[in-house]
Amino acid sequence: MIRLLAVVAILVFACLPQASANEAEGRHGMVATVQPIATDQALTVLREGGNAVDAAVSAALMLGVVDGHNSGIGGGCFILIRQPDGKILAIDGRETAPLSAQRDMYVSDGKAIAELSRTGPLAIAVPGALAAYQQALGKAGTRKLAELLEPAAKVAEAGYPIDRVMARNIATTADDLAKFPATSRIFLKPDGQPYQQGDILVQKDLARSYRAIAREGVGWFYQGCYAQLVSSWMAKNGGILKSRDFRCYRATQRKPIRSTYRGYEIIGFPPPSSGGIHVAQILNILEQFDLRKLYKEDRAEFTNIIANAMKLAFADRAHWLGDTDFVDVPRGLISQEYARQLAGKIDPKSATNVDKYGTPEDWETNLFDRHTTHIATADAQGYWVGITATINTSFGSKVVVPCTGILLNNEMDDFSSQPGAPNAFGLVGSENNSIAPGKQPLSSMSPTIVLKDGKPILTLGAAGGPKIITQVVLGIIRVIDLEWSVEKAVGEGRWHHQWLPNRLFVEGNFEESILDALRGQGHVGQRLERGGVMQAIYRSPNGIFYGVSDPRVPGKAAGL
């Protein structure tokens, strides 16, 4: 693994340069998040003797205040923890469908009505983030939830200056925010205009909710006052979420996905995340190719091979993936033999035609056990943490139940409301991801930890819907195959293919000559403003942590 000085020997990447990523160094601990206030709070927890688990949960709670359009306790999360003794905890705080949910609840006259699963009361699944944070602290933290809630409550009560990302998202969703009075009162001015960058956003109801949880425990949320308030509001506004849904919710400990890539061990999250499976699957396919050599010799061929591997994996995702408590997901998706079969379908010099999903060996019997933000933390004790948290699309369902200040998710849109009908991210799914009471929708969240000789060297994860998976893959390739610094790996331009729609998405600064070559190979290219947002931490052989916050948003990495 080579660091920054050696990177200058590597030829220029196929994309024009990105803005420099925010990189920090530290020997005793590291934090990277999308918002400086959250990073600073997590660093304070580390400085005061907390471990990386405490710091990560503290950051997540603060992000629910200062980055609430992306995540919060009204949503869900996946938490991946590597403990000093080498044990891995995978805590599933994914939302679940209400017990009154029905398979065709969004279908009318034979057609799915997308708006019902994206905005308003029917879009909301049972939140799981708070239960997962409590479980993470109980199993591996040293701080109480109550003491980590109070700093976030103070910021919510006093207010904070809105950054450019939140200001943009308020402006683009203002019409939907205005549909719900309690939401409008928080994020829109009295005259209905959106708050602007630099305006002070005060959230006193959210502060009161945080303090109620600190005082009464998570029971206030799942068995007490909050569950009752939500149930009452839903009954009056056409929703189906009830207090019993909250009472029945449990965060679950899962068995992590373990795979290898060029001598490194890759630890990912299992279903209902598709991330762990498909990060492993794509890397298994790509291990059949000499990417370092291809990168030096032919950038278009290098990009084409990776895009085709993405396409093959997303075709499998659309058919096979779902909540393993309800459907069968074959382990063969991450087998090396199946990867070799898929790699054999790739023509290095043309776009691979993928008509349908593949079929791994023993698919009937060898099965897995039954808009977003990422937080990365690590400490010198040996705790490494990745939390990917979300309320789905920007501002989730747009619903805040009066007097609570808590934005609720729209994760019901991550189900296949109708097989073959695309969701907000253009993803299609099969019957495996259909709606059922108590079922968890499929997710692309991909918190990942990379080990070398049993020791953690890298943790990374991202936001961006299905682009999360491909960002993590590119990050790992860039660090392992190309030997880039983690700063360069996060900062450089990205590309993404998700099978359907059949397009190669590239960031806006992707080099036109390379894109022309890829079009000549049969790809349909489409430019994106940005290909997601990633946070990462790398530890060098001499023990120094390097934390990186993605330059695409005003985040921050900081170390001790």
Image: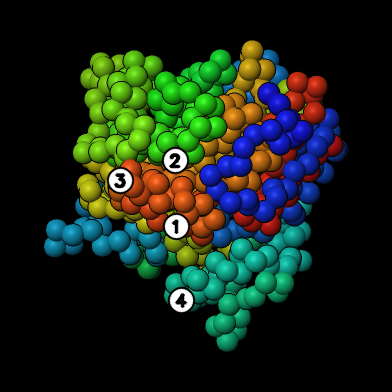
Precedes in sequence: disc 1 or disc 4? 4
How far apart are the alpha carbons under marks 3 and 4? Answer: 39 Å
Q: Left or right of 149: which side holds 16? A: left
Q: Nearer the viewer, residue 363 or 63?
A: 363
Query: What kind of residue is marked 3?
Result: Gly
Q: Left or right of 108: which side holds 479? A: right
How far apart are the alpha carbons under marks 3 and 1? Answer: 16 Å
- Foreground mark, 3 or 4, reads 3
Query: What kind of residue is marked 1?
Result: Arg
Precedes in sequence: disc 1 or disc 2? 2
- Callout 4 secondary element: helix
The residue shown at (46%, 76%) is 175
Q: Nearer the viewer, residue 133 or 524?
A: 524
Precedes in sequence: disc 3 or disc 4? 4
Identify residue for label 2: 300
Q: Position of residue 328 (x, y in %)?
A: 28, 27
User: Crowdedness of circle 2 by 10 Å Cα count: few (<14), some, many (20+)?
Assistant: many
Identify residue for label 3: 522
Precedes in sequence: disc 2 or disc 4? 4
Pointers 2 and 4 in contact (C-beta within 8 Å): no
How far apart are the alpha carbons under marks 1 and 4? Answer: 26 Å
User: Crowdedness of circle 3 by 10 Å Cα count: few (<14), some, many (20+)?
Assistant: some
Identify residue for label 1: 527
How far apart are the alpha carbons under marks 2 and 4? Answer: 42 Å
Q: Nearer the viewer, residue 216 or 40?
A: 40
Identify residue for label 4: 175
- Foreground mark, 3 or 1, reads 3
- Callout 2 secondary element: helix
The residue shown at (39%, 22%) is 334
The residue shown at (60%, 45%) is 492
The residue shown at (42%, 20%) is 288
Residue 513 vertical placement versus 312 (above, below)? below
